[in-house]
Amino acid sequence: MKAVIFDMDGVLIDSEPLHFQGSKRVLKKLGNDLTWGIYKKCIGTTMKKSMEIYIEEFNLDISVDELMELCDNAYMEGLKKNCVAKEGVYPLLKRLVGRITIALASSANESQIEAVLAGLKIKQYFSMILSGEHFEESKPDPRIYEETAKNLQLSSRECLVIEDSEAGLHAAKDAGMKCVMVKTDYTKDVDLSRADHIVNSLNDFNMAWIK
């Protein structure tokens, strides 16, 4: 392996509750109740795709861009109060740095990525950062991972992805990459059979996997 590519939400930070609560507050103001069942459809997708899901589910008379701005602001507000790295993030990054190229390929908007990396103080570890907002299709479409490898001037088989969502797993595997899945409470019912390795936290990452 020549590169480890991290997803962000659910891997570096437990951001799903922040996204869920932020969107829930926005949709409540619009007269709707966002349930976890509906929100689960958004896990692993882009912010734009999530907004499209909300608009369809609740038949909202609002544009994608307007709703995205409202939900993004609500998420950022929550992030300022609770930006905490997931277990094992710092130790793993310190083990990887200098030994292998480290990249980030997240479905999140660039502003959200910047806020998280700044809040966790880990931006310096990543040689390349790619946001899903620049792609027409979100994960499980493999484009973001294919483009990451291309930009790193590597083949897919030289890249190992760390993911937590079903959409991310399929994106990584369809891009021809190996994938380590981090278990979370939000994806405990997800089919992980395509994963090459499954861990409970990044503390369980085996350095032999990148040899």
Image (cartoon, rainbow, N blue to C red):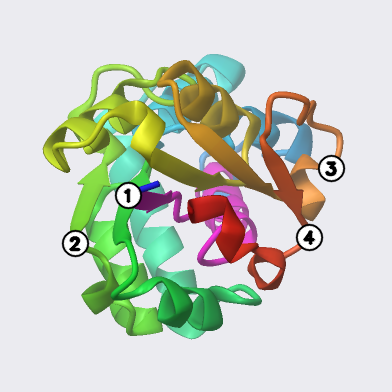
Nearest to N terminus: mark 1 or mark 2: 1
The residue at which mark 1 appears reads as 2
Nearer to us of marks 3 and 1 is 1
The amino acid type of the residue labelled 2 equals Ser
Is residue 179 at all visible to an observer of this figure? yes
- Tell me the SS state at disc 1: loop
Q: CA distance from mark 1 to mark 2?
A: 12 Å
Q: Residue 76: where, in percent of width, then height?
A: 38, 66
Tell me the crowding category of disc 3: few under 14, some 14 to 19, or many 20 or more residues within 10 angstroms, Cα based.
few
Depth order, front residue of 151/110: 151
Q: Identity of the amino acid at label 4? A: Asn
Q: CA distance from mark 3 to mark 2?
A: 31 Å
Q: Which residue is mark 3?
A: 188
Give the camera-side residue of 70 and 171: 171
Query: Considering only order in the chain, which callout, 3 or 4, is on the residue closer to the N terminus?
Result: 3
Which amino acid, by three-letter code, is at mark 3? Lys
The mark closer to the camera, 1 or 2, is 1
- Tell me the crowding category of disc 4: few under 14, some 14 to 19, or many 20 or more residues within 10 angstroms, Cα based: few
The residues tagged by marks 1 and 4 sit, at their Cα atoms, a distance apart of 24 Å
Q: Which residue is mark 2?
A: 127
Vertical side of 85 occupied by 210: above or below = above
The Cα atoms of the two marked residues, 2 and 4, are separated by: 26 Å
| Magenta segment | 3-27
Task: Tell me if label 1 and label 4 are in contact, CB under 8 Å.
Answer: no
In this rendering, the label closer to the viewer, 4 or 3: 4
Mark 4: which secondary structure? loop
| Circle 1 or circle 4, nearest the eye | 1
